[in-house]
Image (cartoon, rainbow, N blue to C red):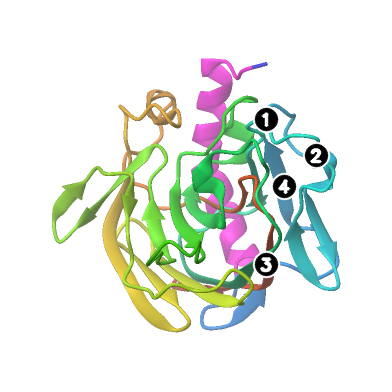
Amino acid sequence: MPLSRNQLRAIVAACPLMLAAILPAGAAEEGKWVKLFNGKDLTGWTPKITGHPLGENTHNTFRVENGILKVSYDGYEKFGKQYGHLYTNIAYSRYIFRCEYRFEGKMMADAPHYVNLNSGVMIHSQSPQSMGIDQEFPSSIECQFLADEGKGARPTGNMCSPGTHIEMDGKLVTKHIVNSTSPTFPAGEWVKIEVEVRGNEEVIHRVNGVEVLRFQKPQLDPENAISPASELLDAGAARLLSYGHIALQAEGQGVWFRNIELKSLEQP
């Protein structure tokens, strides 16, 4: 059942209060790395998969094996546009997020072609509670993970913008994907990703410790049909994105994550 406008307004109105209440105690101490993933289970995270209720880990899509957080499709007969995201229970504003990823296996046969060796992490995401049951992607900024398909250069650490826009060098960027300057990596190789987020001021993507992309002023796009940014704006959300949840993607391609950590950049 979709959220009513009043329900959505209540969720949007509560987000800044929740952020203010949680961050001082729940966020990482400034300058110190803390683990967002405990290596044992999904504590601290909430799944939302298209077509399924909030919190339902459909077909055990997200699982933990040998200390690795895995996205697996061995329980699916078909993909059926069941896009998944695993959200942090806490929203963050100013921080550095880092993790390692590698791709595993083949994409689901009925998934869109772009899903092949494709995943990512969403930052400044709308809350999973505000997602419609059939919504495929949250309004957010994605740091996209890609691997070599054998068809030429395919950089990782790109920016994708479901329901959003960014600015670069003072100019509004409305195209959905902005490529990074990273090299192309084999599918089975562990790649280190780092995303530095400074509220609505600046976002920096790094791959294996090297800066590959930098942009400013992430913001909701009221005309975007992919994600209901206009509904969030109507419910009272700010256009400029200064905080949000972090979410790992499940798009129909097996992928592994490890060493998922965060360093707070919040001032005392």
Camera-side residue of 209 and 183:
183
Q: Which mark is residue 80?
A: 1
Q: Which residue occupies 74% across, 34% down?
A: 78
Among numbered discs 4 and 3, the one appearing first in the sequence: 4
Residue annotated with mark 4: 46
Part of the protein shown in magenta: 2-27
Residue annotated with mark 2: 76
Dominant secondary structure of the residues highlighted in magenta in the image? helix
Residue 265 at x, y = what percent? 45, 73
Residue annotated with mark 3: 257
Amino acid of disc 1: Gly
CA gap, disc 4 and disc 3:
16 Å
Amino acid of disc 2: Tyr
Q: Secondary structure at mark 4?
A: strand
Among numbered discs 2 and 4, the one appearing first in the sequence: 4
Q: Secondary structure at mark 1?
A: loop
Residue 12 at x, y = what percent? 50, 34
Left or right: 119 with respect to 35? left
Q: Which residue occupies 52% across, 43% down?
A: 113
Camera-side residue of 194 and 191:
191
Depth-wise, is mark 1 or mark 4 nearer the camera? 1
Amino acid of disc 3: Phe
CA gap, disc 2 and disc 1:
9 Å
Please say whether residue 239 is one of the residues in the magenta stretch: no
Amino acid of disc 4: Thr
Among numbered discs 3 and 1, the one appearing first in the sequence: 1
Please say whether residue 6 is one of the residues in the magenta stretch: yes
Residue 56 at x, y = what percent? 79, 37
